[in-house]
């Protein structure tokens, strides 16, 4: 949903995918910035709320309230799922501990001391999308989980630092993967980032790792390209599976996962973060 599923990610011919990329004008990027500001407002507010005893449903209700108050529409609720899951029922994706992405908010999911809570949120405002994610640490968190969050956050910061016109994405993806794996952690392969604009998911798909498929279908960064870059990093192995609800993706080994995302516009000077 918010993160593109990597199923035959580069099955399209590279030329077709490049033609499908929708570059944005400065005026369109400004509209996306407005959507991104609502996303940031909501994520910052939820970060203040996250505490032992709070339910993930309470976070969901507050996200919807703030989004509507600022004239936006929550992007995730109602997104079609693969049978028999049905449409996504939440306004946010809220994933706890070993849940990687697509966690469903529920009044029965109570946040506890020591939890890692990942929240992904998207907005549509005046026809343009915004999308970002944060992982929050609750109370007395184990040292290895704290390091997981730090490395995951830094892998995204590394991508932001590297992005500039003329660079190919494979260079960035390879650096992200090398950094994460050098820290003894693993990069999820089944879900990747994506282009974004008037639709939540646009070309190109944006992996956080290097592969033969990416090398064969690489793309160059040009001004006007807007990407949702979102590393999902596991403390243990990289393998994941989908839970019984048909939405929630968890690590196969039961170890924690962290998720960070920013919406980034490539500019003549480098990069503009639209979700700050």
Image: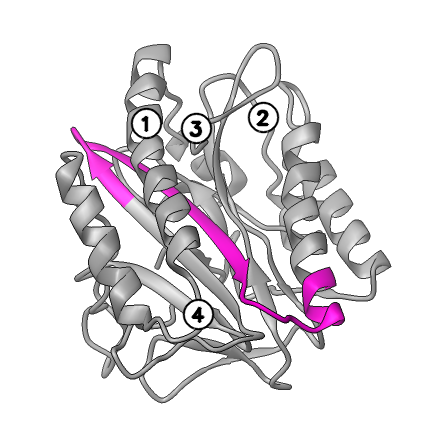
The reply to whether the C-beta atoms of the residues labelled 2 and 4 are less than 8 Å apart is no
The answer to whether 116 appears left or right of 84 in the picture is right
Q: Tell me the element at label 2.
A: loop
Structural crowding at the residue carrying mark 1, measured as other residues with C-alpha within 10 Å and reported as few (<14), some (14–19) or many (≥20): many
Task: Using the image as rendered, state which of residue 131 and residue 135 is in the foreground.
Answer: 135
Residue on which disc 4 sits: 95
Q: Which mark is residue 32?
A: 1
Where 118 sits versus 253, above or below?
above
Q: Residue 44 in the image: x percent, y percent?
A: 41, 44
Is residue 7 something that shows in the picture? no
Q: Tell me the element at label 3.
A: loop
Residue on which disc 3 sits: 274
Region of the chain picked out in magenta, as a range? 123-147
Q: Nearer the viewer, mark 1 or mark 2?
A: 1
Task: Using the image as rendered, state which of residue 46 and residue 244 is in the foreground.
Answer: 46
Distance in Å between CA atoms under marks 1 and 2: 18 Å
Label located before the other in sequence (2 or 3):
2
Distance in Å between CA atoms under marks 1 and 4: 25 Å
Distance in Å between CA atoms under marks 2 and 3: 17 Å
Structural crowding at the residue carrying mark 3, measured as other residues with C-alpha within 10 Å and reported as few (<14), some (14–19) or many (≥20): many
The reply to whether the C-beta atoms of the residues labelled 3 and 4 are less than 8 Å apart is no
The reply to whether the C-beta atoms of the residues labelled 2 and 3 are less than 8 Å apart is no
Residue on which disc 2 sits: 221
Q: Is residue 155 magenta?
A: no
Query: What quarter of the picture does the N terminus occupy?
Result: bottom left
Distance in Å between CA atoms under marks 3 and 1: 7 Å
Label located before the other in sequence (3 or 1):
1
The reply to whether the C-beta atoms of the residues labelled 1 and 2 are less than 8 Å apart is no
Structural crowding at the residue carrying mark 2, measured as other residues with C-alpha within 10 Å and reported as few (<14), some (14–19) or many (≥20): many
The reply to whether the C-beta atoms of the residues labelled 3 and 1 are less than 8 Å apart is yes
Name which residue lies at 34% across and 80% down.
Answer: 109
């Amino acid at each position: 949903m918010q993160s593109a599923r990597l199923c035959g990610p580069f099955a399209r011919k590279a030329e077709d995918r490049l033609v499908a990329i929708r570059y944005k004008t400065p005026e369109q990027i400004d509209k996306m910035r407005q959507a991104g500001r609502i996303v940031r407002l909501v994520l910052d507010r939820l970060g203040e709320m996250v505490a032992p005893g709070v339910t993930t449903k309470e976070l969901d209700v507050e996200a919807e309230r703030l989004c509507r108050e600022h004239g936006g529409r929550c992007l995730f609720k109602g997104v079609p799922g693969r049978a028999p899951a049905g449409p996504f029922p939440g306004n946010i994706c809220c994933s706890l501990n070993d849940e990687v992405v697509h966690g469903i908010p529920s009044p029965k999911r109570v946040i506890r001391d020591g939890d890692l809570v990942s929240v992904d949120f998207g907005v549509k405002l005046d026809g343009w999308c915004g999308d970002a994610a944060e992982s929050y640490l609750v109370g007395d968190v184990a040292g290895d989980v704290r390091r997981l969050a730090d490395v995951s956050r830094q892998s995204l910061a590394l991508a932001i630092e590297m992005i500039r016109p003329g660079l190919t994405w494979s260079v960035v993806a390879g650096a992200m993967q090398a950094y994460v794996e050098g820290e003894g952690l693993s990069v999820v392969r089944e879900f990747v980032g994506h282009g974004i604009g008037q639709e939540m998911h646009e070309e190109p798909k944006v992996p956080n790792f290097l592969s033969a498929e990416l090398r064969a279908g690489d793309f160059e960064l040009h001004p006007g390209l807007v990407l949702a870059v979102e590393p999902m990093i596991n403390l243990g192995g990289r393998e994941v599976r989908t839970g019984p609800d048909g939405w929630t993706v968890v690590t196969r080994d039961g170890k924690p996962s962290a998720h960070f995302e920013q919406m980034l516009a490539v500019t003549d000077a480098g990069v503009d973060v639209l979700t700050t």
